[in-house]
Image (tube, grey):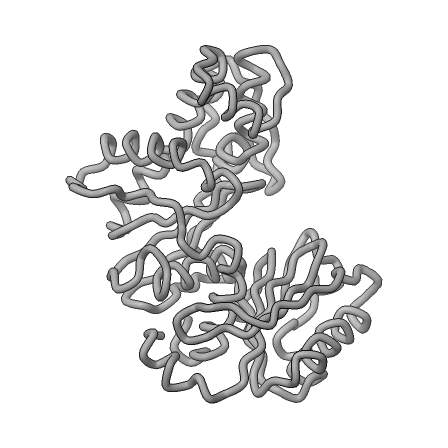
Amino acid sequence: MTATALQQASSVRTAAFDIGGSKIEIARVAPGGAISSRATRPTPHTGWTDFADAVASLVDASGGADRIGISIAGTVDPATGIANAANISAITGHRIAEELAAHLGVPVTVGNDADCFALAEALVGAGRGLPIVFAAIFGTGVGGGLVVNGRLVRGAHGVTGEWGHGPVLADAVRGRGIALVACGCGQLGCVDTYGSARGMERIHAALAGEQLSSHEITRAWHAGDAAAAATIDVFVDLITNPLAMIVNTLGPSLIPCGGGLSSDAELISRIDQSLRGKVLAQYPHSLVVPGLTRGASGLIGAAMLAAAPADEG
């Protein structure tokens, strides 16, 4: 889906949703990505009917819609349409797009939040106009999404770009005296366990013997604290080793970053410098950069998914 095609389809009323465990957010998204008419309400956890009614009430309050795009903090199996979202119990096990479309009477398209971030960054964000964009999430978890020539790549069972999972760091973690902790996916040594905000905290506790939040660690690092600097060195090294394999495999033009840690420009710069020293290609410019659509990427990406459901897949 290109930005030009999105503009041509702009006369259709699109409601974009960003749905997480705590809130449901709706907005209108202009062709260039501008957000308007944002509204929120708490995410119901009492069952599917209450969830569907909450979505319907937001659509009605916004003036209606001809189609709906939804970004969720979870996955949707493209073969079955069944959603799996650990923090949104009301939708897990449901064919969310099909069932909501029947409930609302308009077409519904649903995508993973990391995929929506990747699509937003590739079309109107930092990667606009570039052929291959791999977006990386550094927040409460580690994730990603892949867009090639303006089209979102969706893998088997809805899993693409999930470089945060897989037991790739087990030996590196053991070698640094850091305890192996089971990831939420059940494996040991996942990037998600050590490359997230909680992962940074886990590394610091092991190396420095103190419990600090990721914000406190980065703040101490910026202030010149040696223990925090050692934590950042290990954190960056653990992230960039597997990320180098992603770069060598996919050949991305750019890696826009989202998630809470991406707001620290100096940290992202350190990740970029380390990564470019480990990949085969010579990048004369920054490869890892903060995303430009952070804070609205779910809504923007959801609108783009809704505008071109036939182009994605």
Please give left or right for residue 117 compared with residue 25 in the image. left
Question: Does 250 appear above or below 148?
Answer: above
Residue drawn where x is 49% and y is 38% of the image: 261
Toward the viewer: 229 or 306? 229
Q: Quadrant of the N terminus?
A: bottom left
Question: Does 52 appear above or below 263?
Answer: below
Please give left or right for residue 279 compared with residue 171 in the image. left
Toward the viewer: 182 or 119? 119
Please give left or right for residue 115 compared with residue 255 in the image. right
Residue 144: percent from the left, percent from the top? 44, 50
- Residue lying furthest right: 46
To which quarter of the image does residue 181 belong? top right
Question: Does 15 appear above or below 239?
Answer: below
Residue 260: percent from the left, percent from the top? 53, 42
Residue drawn where x is 55% and y is 71% of the image: 36
Q: Quadrant of the C terminus?
A: bottom left
Toward the viewer: 182 or 103? 103
Residue drawn where x is 44% and y is 84% of the image: 10
Residue 73: percent from the left, percent from the top? 60, 56
Do we see residue 216 in this rendering?
A: yes
To which quarter of the image does residue 202 belong? top right
Residue 239: percent from the left, percent from the top? 41, 32
Do we see residue 241 in this rendering?
A: no
Question: Does 125 appear above or below 79?
Answer: above
Residue drawn where x is 40% and y is 21% of the image: 233
Q: How many discs mark residues in the rendered view?
A: 0
